[in-house]
Amino acid sequence: MATICSEQTLDVPAKVAWDALRRLGQAHELFAPVLVDGQLDGDVRQLQFSNGMTVRERIICIDERLRRVAYTVLDEMFEHHSASMQIVAEDSSTCRFVWISDFLPDAMEEAISPLISEGTKAFVANITRAKA
């Protein structure tokens, strides 16, 4: 099983980053320009990437205590997929964004890795810009 882990420090308090990340219906704004559209219907979120790819995700858990969102991609591109995004406080003014994705087949890593890398950068830039 392939695993991709992306971590990035944000110069904002954990509460600020978590308040943004937990707004699941605004993922296309938080991860712009990697995501260009998104809709949330119950616990299923449909997202469109800037490369034209669309995915449906089921939100598995929103853990307020751990500041963590877990989800799975429902589309047939994966035999298995589980992922989580978490905000971890570093101190009173900084935090880390941690994104972990596990999936099969391993061959999907080449396509998924750049999306996670660019998505992480976009999230950090958008949250930092919103704070300013």
Image (cartoon, grey):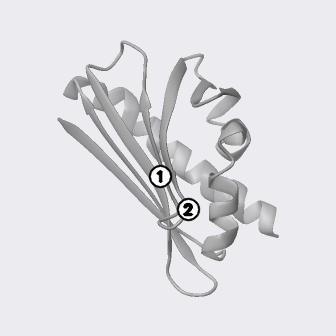
Callout 2 touching callout 1 (CB < 8 Å): no
The extreme bottom residue here reads 92
Q: Which x, y percent locates residue 60? A: 45, 39
How many residues crowd mark 2 within 10 Å: few (<14), some (14–19), many (20+)? few
Mark nearer the N terminus (2 vs 1) = 2
Q: Is residue 10 left or right of residue 98?
A: right
Disc marking residue 103: none
Q: Amino acid at mark 1?
A: Met
How many labels, in total?
2
Q: Residue visible at 47% across and 52% down?
A: 85
Q: Residue visible at 42% across and 48% down?
A: 84
Q: If the image is split into quadrants, where does the N terminus sit?
A: top left
* Residue assigned mark 1: 85
Q: Which x, y percent locates residue 18? A: 62, 62
Q: Is residue 73 left or right of residue 13?
A: left
Q: Residue visible at 42% across and 61% down?
A: 7
Q: If the image is split into quadrants, where does the C terminus sit?
A: bottom right
Q: Which x, y percent locates residue 68? A: 49, 57
Classify mark 2: helix, strand or loop: loop
Q: Which x, y percent locates residue 67? A: 52, 63
Q: Residue visible at 64% across and 64% down?
A: 17
Which of the 4 image quadrants contains residue 77?
top left
Give how far apart the Cα atoms at labels 2 and 1 are.
12 Å
Q: Nearer the viewer, residue 14 or 115?
A: 14
Q: Amino acid at mark 2?
A: Glu
How many residues crowd mark 1 within 10 Å: few (<14), some (14–19), many (20+)? many
Disc marking residue 64: 2
Classify mark 1: helix, strand or loop: strand
- Check the image and report above or below for 89 versus 77: below
Q: Nearer the viewer, residue 107 or 22?
A: 22
